[in-house]
Image (spheres, grey):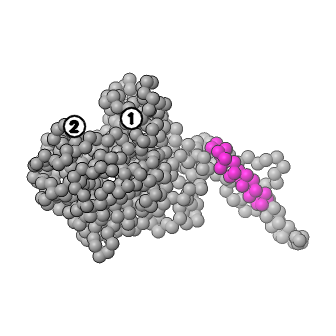
Amino acid sequence: MHATPTTPRARLDARRLRWLAAFAALASIAALQACNGGGSSSSFVPVPGAPAAPPASAPPPAPAPDAATADANLQAAWVEVGEGNAAFARVITSYAAPAADTAADANATCPQITVDGKASRMSLRIGAGSMPLRTTASDPADSKPSEFPVSTCEATLPSGAKQVAVGSRSLPLPKAEPQRILVLADTGCRLKKADNAYQPCNDSSVWPFAPLAATAAGFDPDLVLHIGDYHYRENACPADVAGCKDSPWGYGWDTWQADFFRPAAPLLAKAPWVLVRGNHEECARGGQGWYRFLDTRAYADKRSCNDPANDSTGNYAEPYAVSLGGGSQVIVFDSAKAGKAALKTDDPQFIAYQKQFQTVATLAAKPGMSTTIFTNHHPILAFAPVAGATPAPGNLALQSVMNNLYAKAYYPSGVHIALHGHVHDFQALNFATDHPATVVSGNGGDNLDVALPDPLPAGTTPAPGVTIDRITHHNTFGFMLMERKKSPDVGWTFKAYTVAGKLLATCGQTGRALSCDKTGFLTP
Ligand SMILES: [Fe+2]
C-alpha cells in the first residue's frame, strides 16, 4: 500500500515522481516506435491527457527520446584506428535535424554515443549534401553529381574505453596487442564502361564480398586491415546486362552503401578497422566518399575532392603508424594517385611520394620494433599477371622514388614486410636478396586477375636487383588472417583463406623472411 505524503515537500516530490513515471512510459513507447522503423523523423510529441509539466521549481526532466539516436537512422557504425592509434567511432546517419535544432547545436543531426555509461553527442564530420558534377575518371556523359543524403558523425574514443554504444549497437574497441588481424582488399563490384566490365553485383557467387565479410567476421579478428579499393561501381549497368540490374552507380552514398557499407556490416561490427586508400578512392573516382566516410584525418574542404582544383592536395597524405603492440607496427601509406610509369625527379608527384617515403623511414626507425609492416595499395615488389605473357613488375612510379632514395634496397632498413592489394590475387614472396617479404591480398571480391605463370619464367623479378627465393600464389576469392606468433617467437603467421573459410596456405614471418608451407600456384 502507498503511504500518503503529508508535508508540502513530500507532496511536491510525489508529483515529480508521478510526472517522471508518466514521462518514462511515454519514452518507452517512443523508443518502441523507433525500433519498429517509425523513428526516422519522429520527434517527441506529448499525447492528449499526458500529465502537466512539472512545477517550475522541479529539476529538468530526463532528455527526451532522441530522434537523432534512433536505430532506424543509423546507416552504418564502426570504429577506425588512425595516426598514433587514435580511435574514432564513426556513424553514417540519415537523420535530418530540424533547422531550429541545428541552429542551436551544429551537432544536432548526430546521435548520442555512450562511453562507459556516459552519454554525449557525436560531432558532425560532414553534413548531407549534393556535390556538383566534377571531372571524374569517366566521360561527363557517364558521370553524375555525387548525392550524399546522409551525414557522417564521429567521436574520438578515450584509450581506456571499455564499452561504447550508439543506439542499440555496441561498437568494437581496439586492443593494445591485437592477436588476429583480418586482411582484405579490392572488395567492390566492378561497373566500368571503359573496360566494358559489368560484374554481376546481384550474384554473391560472382561478387562474393558479402559472404566473404560474413566468413571473415566469424574468425573473430581483433582488427581489420583493408588495403584499398572499396568502391568500384563507377558507371551505369546497361539495360541488357541482367547481373547488375538496378545497381546504383557513381560516387554518391547509394553506391558506397551497396558496394561497401552494407556487405561489410558484419565485419565493421566485429572489430576496429585500419583503412588504406586505393586508386579507386583517388579524387576523380571515389575520393569524395573516402573523405566523408573513411579517412582518419579531420575533414577539410581542401582535401574533400569536391573541387578538382584541390586534387593535388586531396590525392596525397602523410603516412602514419599504428602500433600493434609487442614490438610490431603497421605503417599506412597513401598511393591512391600513383600512375604506372616511372617518375622524373622534378615531377610534383615524385616530390610528393619522396616526402611520404622519408616519413616512412622516420616511422620505421622507431626503436624496439621487431616487425614493421608497410602497407599501401599498389604492389611494389610483387607482380601484375598478364594473360599469356611474362608478369608485369611492381609499381614503377613508386619504385622510381624508392630507388632514388634507397637505391636497390627500395625500402628503408626498418621495414620488414610489405602488404598490398590492387592486383586481384594472392601472392606471398620471399626474397633471396635483402628485401622485405611481400604479400598481396587483393582477392576480396572484384573480378579476379588471371593466374601467374607456374613456375615463373627463370629470372622473373618484380624490380631490378630483387631476386625471388620462393613465391606462393593463387587467384581464388578470399582473405588473409595474420596471427601473432606465441611468445617467445617474434613475428606473425599469414594464412590465406577462401571465401568459405578454407585454409589454402600458411606463411610464417620472421624479420624480412617469409616461409610458406606451399610453393607455386595453389588451387582451392
Ligand atoms: Fe586498385
Foreground mark, 1 or 2, reads: 2
266 vs 125, nearest the viewer: 266
- Residue 523: x %, y % from top left: 30, 49
Q: CA distance from mark 1 to mark 2?
A: 19 Å
Q: Which mark is residue 387?
A: 2
* 288 vs 60: above or below: above
Residue at 77% x, 60% y is: 21
Query: In this rendering, is residue 133 above or below 523?
Result: above
10 Å crowding of disc 1: few (<14), some (14-19), many (20+): many
Q: Which residue is mark 1?
A: 199
Whether 32 is among the magenta residues is yes
Residue that protrudes farthest toward the front in the picture = 523
Does the magenta portion include 514? no
Residue 379 at what x, y percent from top left?
24, 48
Q: Amino acid at mark 2?
A: Ala
Q: Is mark 1 within 8 Å of ligand 1?
A: no
Quarter holding the N terminus is bottom right
Query: What type is the residue that disc 1 sits on?
Result: Gln
Magenta stretch bounds? 19-41
Specify the quadrant of the image occupied by residue 364: bottom left
> Residue 112's spot in the image, x, y percent?
57, 55
Q: Residue at the spot x=20%, y=63% of the render?
A: 513
